[in-house]
Image (cartoon, rainbow, N blue to C red):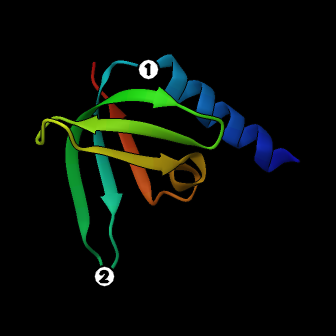
Amino acid sequence: MEKMNVLDSIKRNIEDHLGEKVVLKANSGRKRVVVNNGIIEKTYPSIFVVRLESDTQRKVSYSYSDVLTKTVQLVFAV
C-alpha cells in the first residue's frame, strides 16, 4: 500500500510541472544514459509523455515506476 502512495506523489509532482521544461536522463541499458531536453506534455494514470526539444515531433513516454526505480530521472528547469 505504501508503494502506491510513493507513485501517487511522483505523479502529482510531475503533474505540477506540466508544460515546463525538463532534463530527462534515461538509463538505456549497458551503462548507457541518454540525456534529452524536453517539455512535460501530458500525464495519464500510469504514464507521462515528454516532447523532446531535439526532434520536432518526437515524444517519449515513461511510467511513474520508471522514476521510482531511477530508470528515468527528471530535473525540472528553474
Q: Residues within 10 Å of mark 2 (few under 14, many from 20)?
A: few
- Indicate the position of residue 65 as horizontal and vertical percent values: 60, 53
Number of dots carrying numbers:
2
Please name the residue shown 49% across and 38% down the image.
48
Instruction: Tell me the quarter of the image containing the C terminus.
Output: top left
**Residue ID at (34%, 47%):** 60
Image spot of residue 14 (x, y percent): 50, 29
Could you tell me which secondary element the residue under label 2 belongs to?
A: loop
* Residue at the outermost right position: 1
State the residue lying farthest toward the bottom.
30
Q: Nearer the viewer, residue 62 or 33?
A: 62
Above or below, comparing residue 72 to residue 78 in the picture? below
Choose top left, top right, bottom left or bottom right for residue 46. top right
In space, the residues marked 2 and 1 are separated at their CA atoms by: 30 Å
Left or right of 76? Residue 45 is right
Which amino acid lies under the numbered mark 2 shown in the image of this protein?
Arg
Residue placed at 15% from the left, 35% from the top?
A: 53
SS for callout 1: loop
Q: Position of residue 8 (x, y in %)?
A: 70, 34
Which residue is denoted by mark 2 in the rendering?
Answer: 30
The crowd level at tag 1 (other Cα within 10 Å; few <14, some 14-19, many 20+) is some
- Which quarter of the picture shows residue 49? top left
Kindly identify which residue carries mark 1. 17
Against 18, is 75 above or below?
below
Which of the 4 quarters of the picture holds residue 27?
A: bottom left
Where is residue 45 drawn, in percent x and y? 66, 36
Q: Earlier in the sequence, mark 2 or mark 1?
A: 1
Q: Amino acid at mark 1?
A: His
Residue beneath the point at 78% across and 44% down? 4
